[in-house]
Image: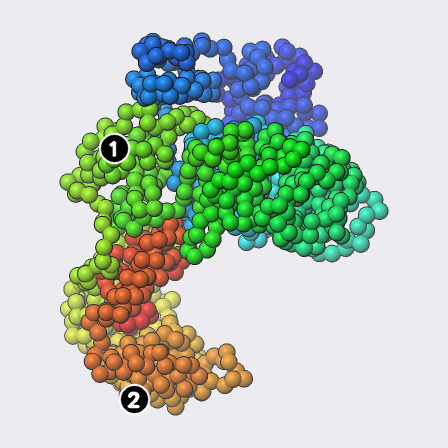
Amino acid sequence: MIISGSTIVLAGRFDRLSKDEARRGLEAMGAKVTASVSARTDLVFAGAKSGPKAGPAAVRGIPIHDEDALVAVLDGRQLGTAPPSPPFTGVPDERMGPREALDVVKNADWSAFSPERDTVPLRAALHALEQAHGVTDAHRLATARLRDAGALLRHSDVHHGEVNGHALSPDGRYLAVGSWTGDDYDRGGVLQIFEVATGRCVHAIDGIMGGVGFPGHARSLQWSADGTRIALEYNTNATGVWDPFGTAPEPIADAFFLASGRPLGMALAPDGRRACVYGGRSGFLRNVIVAMHEGSVAGPPDAAPKGTAPIEFGGPPAGEFQDTCSDEPRFVLDRAFWSRDGSRIYGEAGNACTAISLDVDKRQVSWTLPLEEDEDAAPPEWSRDERLLAHQRGGKLVVADALTGETRAELPAYPGADLLCWGPGGRLAVVDPAGGTVGIIDGTTGEHRHDLHVQAARSHPRGWDAQSWAWSPDGEQAACVTAEGRIEIWALGARPERLRVLDGIRRTVNREVHGFGLEWPAADVLIAIGSHAVRFLRPDTGEIMADHPFHHAPAARRPLVLAGRDVGDRLRLDPTFALDADTWAVAFEDGTIIAPPGRDDDLDGRLAWSVARRFAWPSRWGDRTVFPDPAHAGAGTTEPGTERLLAPFRGRGSTARTTGTWPPADTATVADLITVVRGTLVDLARPGSAGYGEWIVDTYQQLAMVRSRRGEAADARELALAMPEHRRRPGHLARIALALGAGGFAAEAAAVLPSADELGDASDAADLAALAGACAVLGHRDRSERWFAAAREAADADRSNWDLRLPLVWALTECGREQEARVVLDEGVGTPRDRYHGVPWLVCLLRRGEIELVRELIGERSEPRDPNRPHANGVRWFDDWTAAHALTVHGQPDLLRLWGEVNWASVRHDLPVAERVAADGRPTAPTDDELTDLAAQHTGLAKLPKAARRRESAQVARKAAAYGHVSAVLDLLPGTEDTGVYGMGSNDRAYVARTALRTIAIGVDVDVW
């Protein structure tokens, strides 16, 4: 780095020296230090919170260095070199025996230990010692020292959803794997880092919003050239940059321009501080360069401008594409990458079947090449040295100059090829699964070398990073995934030879076959990567170095589940993992392990100590105590954090549930379910969740209504008075008071009755009607008449507004004024337009035995469905399938037939149930067939990964509620989704719990009136 004569900017805050000290030091070396970035700036030294000042430098490609580099420069050291430090003397000689090795480790100055410098040689020496003498005291002492220095125990089973993509670090030492969210979007996805040399997980960042990548999209993970930064497409359509060895789930820098519903492609610059992303307003190329040093960048069309302004590319070279006058851009770059020298961005415009080269310095398109207009055809691929480009078009395999786009060679195409894969030295593999052939081409000369007869598995280069072909680092061998899911190793000398066949990792999940692809980053390491597993292999022997299956879901209860919640979810990384397809285990970062006895070898295959979040250290080398269950672990661990977490388990024995008959005996009651529903409201009331206030008061009202209808007046009153303050609270209290008073519970009704002042002037007619009815049942005649008159006036203002009219009819009916209620009903025009008022009124009528009125509404006052008006509204009463279900569970087969005739709907499957209920009454317990159905549903549920189980758990819970099995509902609710801060979904626990309660209480999931 040349300092003398350079113009330098100091940005942000430095910890080890002041800006004045830095400025004086740099000026003494001949530099000019300025306050802000300009066209004359040569480099920037950036500390913390430097985004606003360093952003303009990042977007222009001006070199940015951190505080370590600044200190090194001022100390006269080369960049990237550590300050002078004493050598670490604790690495035994490989010829030493156990005693000598122990002495070396014991006598070493461990304060001089540098993880980056010393971990690998120390590990290698102890590996040699283990091969000769087994695990010794030297291994145990070294492990203890590393644990004291902060080494953490890691398992690899960290993903909630499927793996979406991966990327090898430029030096080949690390594999980054990214996954989606599973069912819980707000829980986020995971970035996982493996050390290639050992095949072990050394780090993971959980909670990346919206997950990493997206199904069917490739190149969503890209490393910087020095491996200190990694860019991810995350949260569906944002781009962010992370420290791959940091711990924060939030990005260092991020960019967002369009809420497209899927990733839009990105390319990270070699310096890791700028990226090419979708954005800008150009009608030719809709991609811009943005600063990714620190902070956020955003802009149109879906965000307000924020951060450093992006740089747009100019139009095409003169004379090309002059007809591009359109509101839509001609090109949107995808599968993009930045050249290693930073001068070019290459990629593919899938929307135009075109390969593109962008000149970064000139900010314009260098060249474009038309591609095969077949989305299943092999996409273009650039050689490893970025000098050549291969693509197929018009029956030709074309090798072009990557700098100019000019054709260098043409060969006959492989029509069924779906993958072009460059190897070292310009060798090109053309993988043709349809033809059962892999062509080997010398791309530098354009000569065809070999055709291998291999039935390769299909690849999807545009949608998945791991492909069916991988070259060895020296280019003399290659590996291919076959259609049968095996791995063939080939020698590719003068006479190609199949050397061996290895087992693959193809896996069937939910009756869907998931394939895999390959990477060969080191001579002795081959990696198989699938959406549900990663395996590290020795290509010369087939030995499995490390196997990492994800998403196994043992049927037993997870060990850390207590009172329906998994306490492991509180931690940054969930310590629970699947030891195998049938067994759960737990590994805390501090080394506390919970697992069945006698599984040490299996644990060693799944666990490793992580040193500095970069290097794996065998777990078997340290002393470890394995506890059989959380109760013993809580009593036996010496780690304070784990002890506190496990304290509630003490004295409980094993929390594991043996697999057996499900559903459980139905011993729970509706009161138990009400308690659980109320418990879900506590979580919704936490800070930052103010948007759920309406849901909370609505649910309290429904709980009180259920209690009232069951004759549990004191409990109904308690729930009503516990309802938090909200604008809807007075109206809800009026409805509860009316229900209680109509049921003969005058004292409880009076206790919850709101005053007129509480209702306020803004109350709607429905609230006024409820207050009027409550006053009537409590004998407050004058108040009742006044509020009924106000409600009647509001309802008559729009006779087709059943949202106001039906609650008035209900209130009049509840307080015994049936004739007046019928007049109000008859004066209405049309019908309710949705089930939220129509079906609750239907259930109310069925509960009261008003069968003839229901018959009149469905038959005489509804227009039969007209094929020419299939979506007509306001012409049929109870025009919703929930109404059919209500008629079924209330045992009304005749009304159900009538409903089916009027609505042109088949009810033949529901009629036998309605007839059975009419003859025998509503069942008090599930039938044998229903229990069998629940058991089958649960068996399928148990086979799903935890993160993919939430949605299905909600569905099975709804079915259990329909069958009236309260205990099954309560057993399933902990497995449903937590409600996030961005909104509630129908599969969230609070939603499912309330649905189940109403279904069990009144037969259908509608408001209890």
Give the side of residue 896 with respect to residue 209, left or right. Answer: left
Name the residue type under label 1: Val
Q: Quadrant of residue 45?
A: top right
Q: CA distance from mark 1 to mark 2?
A: 69 Å
Give the side of residue 645 with respect to residue 404, left or right. Answer: left
Residue 85 visible in the current orientation: yes
Residue under the point 50% across and 78% down: 871
Density class for disc 1 (Cα within 10 Å; few <14, some 14-19, many ≥20) is many
Residue 244 visible in the current orientation: no
Density class for disc 2 (Cα within 10 Å; few <14, some 14-19, many ≥20) is few
Residue under the point 44% across and 33% down: 543
Q: Nearer the viewer, residue 114 or 656?
A: 656
Q: Position of residue 172 (x, y in %)?
A: 54, 30
Q: Outermost residue toward the bottom? A: 860
Secondary structure, mark 1, is strand
N-term mark: 1 or 2: 1
Residue under the point 58% across and 47% down: 456
Residue pointed to by mark 1: 626
- Relative vertical location of residue 565 with respect to residue 678 in this rendering, above or below: above
Residue pointed to by mark 2: 852
Name the residue type under label 2: Glu
Quadrant, the N terminus: top right
Give the side of residue 928 with respect to residue 218, left or right. Answer: left
Quadrant, the C terminus: bottom left
